[in-house]
Image: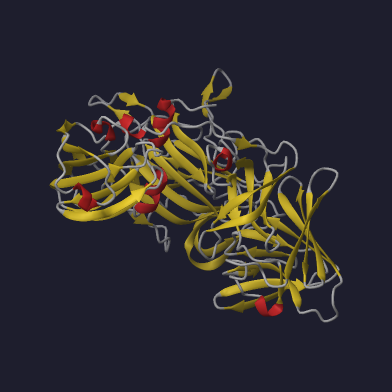
């Protein structure tokens, strides 16, 4: 459907992702001890160096000695929940967590609003009880009745034993001076493994299992400890209870004409001037060939680091207290410019200049400021960021096997972002998909969830690319079949075709799933990915014309670490994903330059399983 201007405004009201990257955490828990948490009756909680959980053993988690990881190992006797010693109101919190197979837990904001943590690997249609769900409220009428639970938009849950990442932005309930609740709590944004699963979600009251049913302005974090093993690390907490930046009306001056550089504005006759309550390109009274300079005061409540986020169509520059913070530069409306500066309390002078000369570019202006411990303030009017008319998203699903050719922009774990120009996107009804690079025989990324957003390819002039619509796992875009001497070569396909590589296209089976073919010199390769149990991929490589004593090997994985968990299972890149090998295959692990490589000899057939 086409988004209404109001909905577009809701989506654009705050640049959440940029803020999450810009704002340093107020607290980064070191987890060297349990001092952040109340210790009473919590013998099931402990600090460890790492945790491990097997795919095929329910409710089983083992630990290694050290610090940095918080672990719950409940017993029949010890199964207490864990509460923080500090109370929070508005807060952003993020952490990594690991579920044992079949395990169940939950993270409570203010001890009252639960985000469910569960082993939901492979669930096709998640409910409120699955990982990332907002657990239901309870009432007795006269029997227990569950209501108001909210399922995650998508199942972004990873396999048990893998580290997963959760980000939560929470707004506490509001109360008047008499203590009467005037607004419900909200989950402004919840992101699981890079996928948005909740946004601007109203919480009508405490969910099941709270510390009590009475809502309050502040309350502790609580982690459920009575259901199964779970581990946590990398807690970051940003307290948002500070007062946001405020501002006075801005003076503005408008000039008309063709301007390509800041010096072109010098000596120009002012066409319009006045004051505006909020920043807006609309004061120009036209949508092109204008320049506007805004000046005004912002009031800082708490001294410290302040983050500025600017979005504009055309050129812009920003000065704070007479010093240049963002130099003159041209941007498209959806390219954010960011900067941070220490500001004192009281009035601070802001000067913003924008100018736009490109008729094809829709006018747009948004400026946000985030202060220490405070939410961001939008200095612009709502209408100023409605200048871009939202087009209908062009989405492609995979209700049946799909093979789709497009450019694909990827960000490998190692190396710079790149565009694959000969990419094949392969979709499956099991909601597991992948990108295949025809230039080198690499699987560049896999994802779970919806298939593709092809708007960048087909909307207006387009740029030929598509984008995954699910929870993404990226790989190094390098060949799987390599010369042994190139085992750690990450740049073989970065800018030019891989040496010795000759693509031969692909065939489709009766169900429409591809088998890719290529040659490495005279060595012929068939490369086939298939979904197993609607949970993971098998990858089978069939080799023909294999030379005696071939110099080629089959490189199964690269990573900073490759850990052997059992005879057949390996954890890659710090338990980021698994590779499982069939019995009889004898892989080798080698290290070089801070990287590990897992490889096997090239034989008639090599098959392995990619689990995440």
Residue 192 visible in the displayed image: yes
Report the residue that reaches farthest toward the front.
258
Residue drawn at point x = 58 percent, y = 73 percent: 595
Residue 192 or 233: which is nearer the viewer? 192
Does 120 appear above or below 560? Answer: above
Q: Is residue 114 above or below residue 147?
A: below
Q: Is residue 172 left or right of residue 73?
A: left
Which residue is pictured at 76% across the width and 58% down the height?
Answer: 539
> Where residue 245 appears, x then y in whole percent?
22, 41
Residue 400 vs residue 242, the one in the foreground: 400
Residue 352 image point, x, y percent: 22, 45
Quarter of the N terminus within the rendering: top right
Which of these two is toward me, 482 or 578? 482
Q: Is residue 110 visible?
A: no
Residue farthest top in this picture: 141
> Residue 428 vs residue 478: left or right?
right
Q: Tally the numbered discs.
A: 0
Q: Which image quadrant for residue 218?
A: top left
x, y percent for residue 490:
59, 70
Q: With respect to residue 19, does 416 lie above or below?
A: below
Give the side of residue 224 with respect to residue 374, left or right. Answer: right
| Residue 582: quadrant of the picture | bottom right
Return the x and y of residue 551 as percentages of the image width and height.
76, 79
Specify the color scheme: secondary structure
């Amino acid at each position: 459907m086409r988004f209404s201007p109001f909905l577009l405004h809701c989506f654009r009201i705050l640049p959440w992702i940029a803020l999450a990257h810009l704002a340093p955490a107020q607290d980064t828990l070191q987890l060297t001890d349990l001092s952040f948490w109340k210790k009473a009756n919590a013998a099931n909680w402990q600090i460890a160096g790492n945790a491990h959980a097997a795919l095929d053993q329910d409710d089983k988690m083992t630990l290694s000695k050290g610090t940095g990881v918080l672990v719950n190992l409940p017993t029949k006797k010890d199964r207490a929940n864990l509460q923080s010693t500090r109370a929070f109101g508005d807060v952003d919190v993020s952490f990594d967590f690991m579920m044992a197979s079949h395990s169940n837990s939950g993270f409570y904001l203010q001890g009252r609003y639960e985000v469910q943590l569960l082993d939901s690997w492979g669930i096709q249609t998640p409910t409120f009880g699955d990982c990332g769900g907002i657990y239901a409220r309870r009432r007795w009428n006269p029997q227990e009745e569950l209501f108001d639970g909210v399922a995650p938009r998508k199942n972004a849950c990873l396999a048990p034993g893998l580290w997963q990442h959760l980000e939560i932005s929470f707004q506490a309930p509001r109360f008047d001076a008499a203590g009467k609740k005037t607004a419900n709590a909200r989950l402004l944004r919840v992101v699981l493994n890079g996928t948005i699963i909740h946004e601007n979600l109203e919480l009508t009251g405490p969910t099941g299992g709270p510390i009590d049913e009475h809502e309050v302005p502040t309350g502790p974090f609580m982690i459920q400890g009575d259901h199964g093993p779970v581990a946590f690390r990398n807690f970051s907490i940003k307290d948002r209870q500070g007062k946001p930046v405020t501002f006075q009306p801005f003076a503005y001056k408008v000039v008309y004409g063709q301007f390509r550089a800041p010096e072109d504005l010098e000596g120009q006759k002012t066409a319009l001037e006045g004051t505006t309550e909020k920043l807006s390109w609309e004061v120009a009274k036209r949508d092109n060939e204008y320049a506007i300079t805004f000046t005004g005061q912002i009031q800082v409540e708490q001294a410290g680091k302040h983050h500025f986020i600017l979005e504009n169509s055309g050129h812009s520059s920003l000065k704070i207290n007479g010093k240049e913070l963002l130099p003159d530069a041209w941007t498209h409306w959806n390219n954010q410019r960011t900067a941070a500066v220490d500001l004192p309390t009281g009035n601070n002078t802001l000067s913003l200049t924008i100018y736009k000369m490109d008729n094809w570019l829709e006018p747009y202006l948004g400026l946000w400021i985030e202060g220490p411990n405070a939410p961001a303030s939008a200095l612009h009017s709502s209408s100023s960021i409605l200048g871009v008319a939202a087009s209908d998203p062009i989405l492609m699903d995979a209700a049946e096997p799909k093979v789709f050719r497009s450019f694909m922009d990827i960000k490998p774990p190692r190396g710079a972002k790149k565009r694959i120009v000969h990419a094949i996107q392969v979709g499956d009804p099991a909601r597991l998909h992948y990108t295949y690079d025809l230039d080198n025989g690499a699987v560049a990324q896999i994802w779970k969830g919806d298939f593709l957003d092809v708007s960048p390819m087909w909307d207006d002039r387009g740029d030929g690319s598509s984008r995954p619509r699910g929870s993404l796992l990226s790989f190094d875009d390098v060949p799987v079949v390599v010369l042994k001497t190139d085992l750690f070569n990450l740049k073989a396909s970065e800018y030019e075709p891989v040496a010795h590589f000759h693509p031969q296209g692909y065939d489709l089976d009766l169900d429409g799933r591809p088998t890719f073919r290529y040659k490495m010199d005279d060595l012929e390769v068939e490369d086939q990915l298939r979904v197993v149990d609607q949970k993971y991929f098998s990858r089978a490589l069939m080799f023909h014309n294999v030379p005696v004593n071939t110099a080629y090997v089959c490189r199964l994985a690269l990573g900073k670490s490759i850990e052997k968990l059992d005879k057949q299972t390996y954890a890659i890149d710090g338990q980021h994903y698994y590779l499982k090998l069939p019995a009889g295959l004898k892989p080798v692990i080698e290290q070089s330059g801070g990287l590990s490589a897992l490889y096997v000899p090239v034989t008639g057939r090599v098959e392995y399983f990619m689990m995440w």
